[in-house]
Image (cartoon, rainbow, N blue to C red):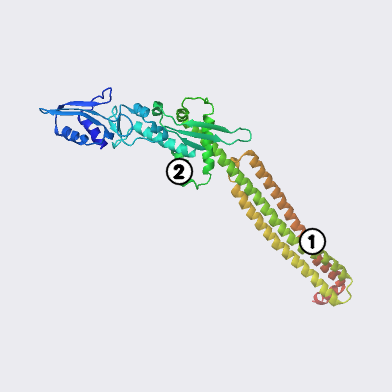
């Protein structure tokens, strides 16, 4: 229906609107004008009013008063539209309107840059109302509260912005609004760090607009002026947050890897220590061997000592393989964690390097301990062999002479 009014206006050549906001026509009555007038005569008052209409001797004369504000209104230009449309401050743009200076109607397929700006600003207002700490809807604007939590050295900040509009909003080309849209969408509420990201945006707005006076006439316009700077501040603070989060995660992973390695190593050593208790008992058995009187006692005791050494050496070899697997697993974990170590903060680099040095020292201690235990494990076998060689050296010598010297 509204398009019928606009098409009539265009058909009669878009005459200038009078001071009272009417347009009139007096001229030949062609079929297009007659048809258009017939349509608007039956339109409801919400689309305008046909003040008079006269047709005589092929001449048609009429005057029409279009709506001057709100839906279905005629505006001289976009600044006038902004002045007369309070709903823009609530993020609500008109659905049907016509701008005389641009000869552009909201239903036209060709887009209008000024209208696109208003659409983006309205969307931005609605999105900001969802990411602000709180929002209070007024008749013609939102009162949005942005705040930041107190830090270790910073007091909390709170900023109240009323989304009041003026003609100046048409001078801003706000293109980077996808960030706020993504933070405002309800379907993104389940995404990780969403609340933190909203808080970072709140903080960026408060930080950039912190220098505004409390009685600034239009803080929303100031926000639009500083929009690029607000986004730059957001991304800088967001990167700091993500890096801090990632570094904390890496620090915990290093600490956990160190604890896991220590626990598994402790378990391996506890197992070794329990089994190495057989070593001093076997050494006592060497004394028993020296006091043995029969060949049977000597054979049984010697065999027991040799078997003890073989078992201890086998157990130590198995534990050494387990520890080597632990070392390999830890090395792989550390390699993955230290690929980007140069991008970490200095304190985290120092922590990682200190942890690696501690573990390398522990690995050296483990390696030497295993070597010493292995060396000691040969003691029972060596003692039994030395005793047997000493005990039966004469018999062995005679046997060798008998079997090898004769040949």
Q: Residue 318, percent across and down?
A: 69, 63
Q: Find numbered disc 1 in the image and state the secondary structure of the residue it sits on.
A: helix
Instruction: Answer whether residue 256 is visible to the viewer in this image.
Output: yes
**Numbered mark located on residue 185 in the image:** 2
Residue sticking out furthest to the top: 19
Q: Nearer the viewer, residue 302 or 263?
A: 263
Q: Earlier in the sequence, mark 1 or mark 2?
A: 2
Q: Pointer 1 and pointer 2: residues touching (CB < 8 Å)?
A: no
**Numbered mark located on residue 118 in the image:** none
Which quadrant is home to the C terminus?
bottom right
Q: Residue 337, percent across and down?
A: 60, 48
Please count the marks in the image: 2
Q: Work out how far the residue at label 1 is from the one at label 2, CA to CA, in angstroms.
A: 70 Å
Frontmost of labels 1 and 2 is 2
Query: How many neighbours does mark 2 have within 10 angstroms: few (below 14), some (14-19), or many (20 or more)?
Result: few
For image coordinates 45% across by 43% down, the residue present is 185
- Residue 219, compared with residue 326, is above or below; it is above
Q: Nearer the viewer, residue 306 or 28?
A: 28
Q: Residue 57, percent across and down?
A: 10, 27
Quarter of the image for residue 55 reads top left
Which quadrant is home to the N terminus?
top left
Query: Which residue carries the number 1 mark?
Result: 376
Query: How many neighbours does mark 1 have within 10 angstroms: few (below 14), some (14-19), or many (20 or more)?
Result: some
Instruction: Answer whether residue 59 is visible to the viewer in this image.
Output: no
Q: Residue 6, percent across and down?
A: 25, 33
Quarter of the image for residue 276 reads bottom right
For image coordinates 65% across by 51% down, the residue present is 257
- Residue 84, compared with residue 379, is above or below; it is above
Q: Find numbered disc 2 in the image and state the secondary structure of the residue it sits on.
A: loop
Q: Nearer the viewer, residue 150 or 117?
A: 150
Apparent side of residue 404 relative to residue 143 in the rendered image (left or right): right
């Amino acid at each position: 229906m509204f398009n019928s009014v606009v098409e009539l206006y265009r058909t009669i050549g878009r005459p200038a609107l009078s001071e009272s906001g009417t347009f009139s026509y007096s001229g030949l009555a062609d079929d297009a004008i007659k048809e258009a007038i017939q349509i608007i005569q039956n339109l409801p008052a919400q689309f305008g009013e046909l003040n008079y209409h006269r047709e005589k001797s092929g001449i048609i004369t009429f005057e029409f008063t279009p709506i001057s504000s709100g839906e279905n209104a005629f505006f001289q230009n976009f600044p006038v539209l902004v002045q007369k449309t309070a709903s823009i401050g609530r993020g609500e743009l008109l659905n049907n309107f016509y701008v005389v200076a641009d000869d552009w109607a909201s239903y036209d397929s060709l887009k209008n840059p000024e209208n696109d700006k208003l659409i983006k600003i309205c969307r931005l207002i609605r999105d900001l109302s969802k990411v602000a700490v709180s929002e209070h809807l007024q008749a013609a604007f939102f009162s949005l509260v942005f705040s930041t939590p107190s830090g270790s050295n910073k007091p909390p900040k709170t900023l109240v912005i009323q989304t009041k509009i003026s003609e100046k909003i048409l001078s801003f080309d706000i293109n980077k609004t996808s960030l706020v849209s993504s933070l405002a969408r309800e379907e993104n509420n389940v995404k990780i760090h969403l609340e933190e990201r909203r808080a970072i945006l709140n903080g960026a707005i408060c930080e950039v607009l912190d220098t505004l006076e409390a009685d600034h006439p239009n803080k929303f316009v100031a926000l639009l002026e500083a929009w690029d700077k607000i986004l730059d501040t957001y991304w800088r603070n967001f990167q700091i947050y993500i890096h801090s989060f990632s570094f904390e995660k890496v620090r915990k992973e290093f600490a956990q890897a160190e604890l896991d390695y220590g626990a598994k190593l402790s378990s391996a050593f506890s197992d070794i220590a329990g089994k190495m208790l057989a070593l001093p008992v076997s050494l006592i058995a060497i004394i028993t061997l020296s006091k043995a009187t029969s060949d049977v006692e000597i054979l049984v005791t010697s065999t027991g000592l040799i078997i003890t050494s073989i078992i201890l050496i086998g157990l130590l070899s198995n534990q050494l393989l387990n520890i080597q697997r632990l070392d390999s697993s830890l090395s792989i974990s550390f390699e993955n964690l230290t690929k980007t170590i140069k991008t970490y903060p200095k304190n985290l680099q120092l922590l990682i390097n200190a942890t690696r040095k501690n573990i390398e020292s522990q690995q050296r201690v483990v390696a030497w301990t295993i070597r010493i235990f292995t060396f000691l494990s040969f003691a029972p076998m060596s003692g039994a062999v030395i005793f047997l060689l000493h005990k039966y050296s004469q018999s062995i010598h005679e046997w060798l002479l008998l079997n090898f010297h004769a040949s």
